[in-house]
Image: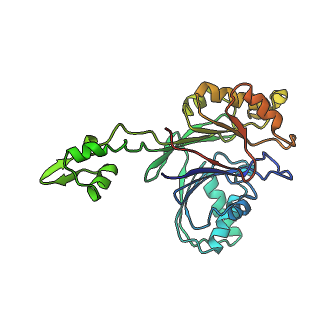
Amino acid sequence: MTKLEVIFLGTSSAAPTKTRSLHSVAIRREGQVILMDCGEGAQGRFVKLGLGLNREMLVLITHLHGDHVNGLLGLLQTMGMSQRIRSLTIVAPPELFGWLKMTMKVLHIGLTFDVSFVPVRSGIVYRGKDFKVRAARANHSIDSWSFLFEELPRPGVFDRAKAVSLGIPEGKKWSSLQRGRSVVVGGMKFSPGQVLGPARPGRSIGYSGDTRPTRRLTKFFAGVDLLIFESTFASKDEDKAVERKHSTASEAAGLAKEAAVKRLVLTHFSARYRRADALVREARGVFPETVAASDGLVLDVPVPQ
């Protein structure tokens, strides 16, 4: 079973605090890292948490506010200094690419690896071997996006008794069928559908970036296993959330409830709140399966039963 983890590198908005770095979240899956936003200080957490500087990696940037991108240049430079050789893909608003290229030229930063730039758009923005990433527009003060990581469906449960009854010998033939490949035994061809049950759903992780809650995002995140949603403000400061195009904790919980997600993680907290306890309490009043992110928190996303 492939392990799927979400690691919070930074959970503050706009400015760091004594306990929270600027915003950045990583998904770690089978040796690959998917980095969602990269605020200042992310590379320090990257090293401290052992994410590795030469792993297969995808970077997703929701929008071009400093607390979501200012750590990216330093991370790329450190990867180059560490002699990274793997290519890297960055999905982001296209203006980011010009900024990176110009700044690297001015600061004489040379990279030891190739970088592929993919302009973000609605729909599928990246396809991995057995997962995909989709994007949808968010509702923030500037052009902003939300992302959805989705594993491809897993093969159904292997029926050992059926395989035996068909005369398929245990070993490599069974393994091939379990991987979705047809096999030939005694001149007869057997397909995976003859010995596998219905396909099983993969896991999904939604990431809001900075946004107001919207009907589009409710639909986009419907049924996800884990939803990471910004909750910059408490309900008592809803006027500020509306003015600055952010969400409150209860609004994030309301979207999670309507979207029927399995778990909600609040993050991107304003520095005005020393602790997130009050925000979690108000969110749990709407959606009980809510927790607050903290810097260094690692959450496992289990395989659906």
Report whether 197 appears left or right of 278.
left
Report whether 162 appears left or right of 40.
left
Residue 295 at what x, y percent from top left?
75, 51
Report whether 37 appears left or right of 285.
left
Taking depth in this image into account, of 97 and 288 the one nearest to the observer is 288
Q: In this view, does 190 lie above or below 223?
A: below
Residue 20 at what x, y percent from top left?
80, 51
Which residue is depicted at the point 67% across and 69% down? 78
Residue 220 at what x, y percent from top left?
55, 33
When asked about the image quadrant of residue 28, the answer is: bottom right
Report whether 108 appears left or right of 223.
right
Residue 124 at what x, y percent from top left?
48, 43
When asked about the image quadrant of residue 200, the answer is: top left
Which residue is depicted at the point 46% across and 52% down? 128
Taking depth in this image into account, of 79 and 51 the one nearest to the observer is 51
Q: In this view, does 293 lie above or below 84?
A: above
Taking depth in this image into account, of 101 and 87 the one nearest to the observer is 87
Which residue is depicted at the point 41% across and 44% down? 154
When asked about the image quadrant of residue 13, the answer is: top right
Query: How many numbered markers are drawn?
Result: 0
